[in-house]
Amino acid sequence: MVLAQPQNQSVVKAFDLTGKVAIVTGGARGIGLEVSRGLAEAGANVAIIYNSSKTAETTAYEIASANNVLAAAYRADVTNQAEIEAVVQNVVRDFEKLDIMVANSGIASCIAAEDYTTEQWSDIMKVNLDGAFYSAQAAARVFKDQGHGNIVFTASVSATLVNVPQKQAAYNASKAGVVQLAKCLSVEWVDFCRVNCISPGFIATDILDIHPVEWREKWLSMIPANRMAQTYELKGAYVFCASDASSYMTGANIVIDGGYTLP
């Protein structure tokens, strides 16, 4: 059973991912890029899954060289169940196993709820919820056969609150779905893998640069820390979830938001 009590070991050893194989969807940029780097820094071999990045191959090479691990990039559309299944199987063949799946791919939009078209609503759900499930499902089939594995979803504080002033009902609903999905899978798959979520708050990535300055000022006024996080400030939490340091944790949702959800 995946939650069987492990041997006691040093904290350093518990966090060590040496020899593990990890997949990170959306792993070539933003939060996913730092997750890929963080897992490699902890010793894991990393497969980056990307869809549109033009630098994924170079990124994989740089990660491998900097950390003396194996790293490779694979193109796949996470909204295509058969495609993500095939790529996961390719990773297993190339790396000879799989230990960790980080389902991180996501997109966002700001549209008034009454104005969503069918396509606009569906696009968000396909990537953020369907894609997260298909990625986890493909990994879980491997984990079930080998008897162990670890899934970490990237959710969002938007799963538990309503962001203002932007209007993003589809994004918020999709991330709420991811959190509940993780809880369901953590129980259903408890015999062969752990499943947890990380919910970031406002993170300083390129995706926020497109928004008006007044929105950013509003967000900062609502964050007790009075700043946004840098992407690298999240990677330790992913390593924790992916490692033996969290061996008895499953179905959890770790919120990392500078206090944004508290007031």
Image (tube, grey):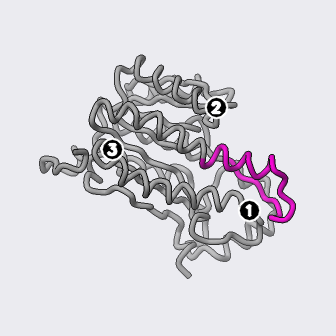
> Which residue is pictured at 67% across the width and 76% down the height?
221
Query: For the view shown, which residue lies furthest in the top direction?
Result: 94
Label 1 to label 3: alpha-carbon separation: 32 Å
Q: Which residue corresponds to mark 1?
A: 168
235 or 100: which is nearer to us? Answer: 100
* Mark sitting earlier along the chain (2/3): 2
The label shown at residue 77 is: 2
Q: Which residue corresponds to mark 3?
A: 193
As shown in the figure, which amino acid type bears the numbered disc 3? Cys
Q: Magenta stretch: give its range.
A: 107-129
> Which residue is pictured at 29% across the width and 38% down the height?
148
* Mark sitting earlier along the chain (2/1): 2
Is 25 situated left or right of 41 in this image? right
Q: Secondary structure at mark 1?
A: loop
* Mark sitting earlier along the chain (1/3): 1
Numbered disc total: 3
170 or 82: which is nearer to us? Answer: 82
> In the rendering, at what x and y percent does residue 231 appear?
55, 51
Label 2 to label 3: alpha-carbon separation: 24 Å
Neighbourhood count class around disc 2 (C-alpha, 10 Å): few under 14, some 14–19, many 20 upward: some
Q: Secondary structure at mark 2?
A: loop
Q: Nearer the viewer, mark 1 or mark 3?
A: 3
65 or 100: which is nearer to us? Answer: 100
